[in-house]
Amino acid sequence: MTDKKKILDVRFPKDQQEKSKELIKGLKQKKYQVDIEYPDGKVRFMYGDDPVVLEMYAKAHGLKILKVSKL
């Protein structure tokens, strides 16, 4: 068994994301949503099952955490 942590990192256009049934299904299975802000001011969202892992990912990439929500 692996201890590898998974974070959903979506890097394709929003219109394609909204059409992806597989993506929407995957997001509904996650427990937490984290609102993040990039250094250029863009606000995005990350989804995962462990808020600590999401926080470590954000810090490692220089992102500012705005809000953590339990889904």
Image (cartoon, helix red, strand yellow):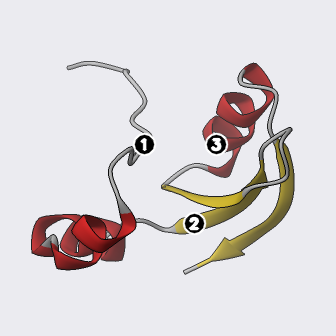
- Residue nearer the viewer, 16 or 58: 16
The residue at which mark 2 appears reads as 32
**Which residue: 17% across, 77% down?**
19
- Residue nearer the viewer, 22 or 51: 22
- Residue nearer the viewer, 17 or 56: 17
Q: Looking at the picture, which amino acid does disc 2 mark?
A: Tyr
The residue at which mark 1 appears reads as 9
Circle 2 SS class: strand
| Residue projecting furthest to the left | 21
Q: Looking at the picture, which amino acid does disc 3 mark?
A: Leu
Do the numbered discs 1 and 3 sit on residues whose CB atoms are within 8 Å? no
N-terminal of the pair, mark 1 or mark 3, is 1
Residue 14 % position (x, y): 38, 67
Q: Looking at the picture, which amino acid does disc 1 mark?
A: Asp
The residue at which mark 3 appears reads as 54
**Badge 2: few (under 14), some or many (20 or more) residues near its Cα, within 10 Å?**
some
Q: In what quadrant of the picture does the N terminus appear?
A: top left
Residue 64 % position (x, y): 87, 45
**Badge 3: few (under 14), some or many (20 or more) residues near its Cα, within 10 Å?**
many
Tell me how far mark 2 sits from mark 1, CA to CA: 14 Å
Nearer the viewer's eye, disc 2 or disc 1? 1
Tell me how far mark 3 sits from mark 2, CA to CA: 9 Å
Do the numbered discs 2 and 1 sit on residues whose CB atoms are within 8 Å? no
Left or right, 45 with reference to 60? left
Q: Quadrant of residue 26?
A: bottom left
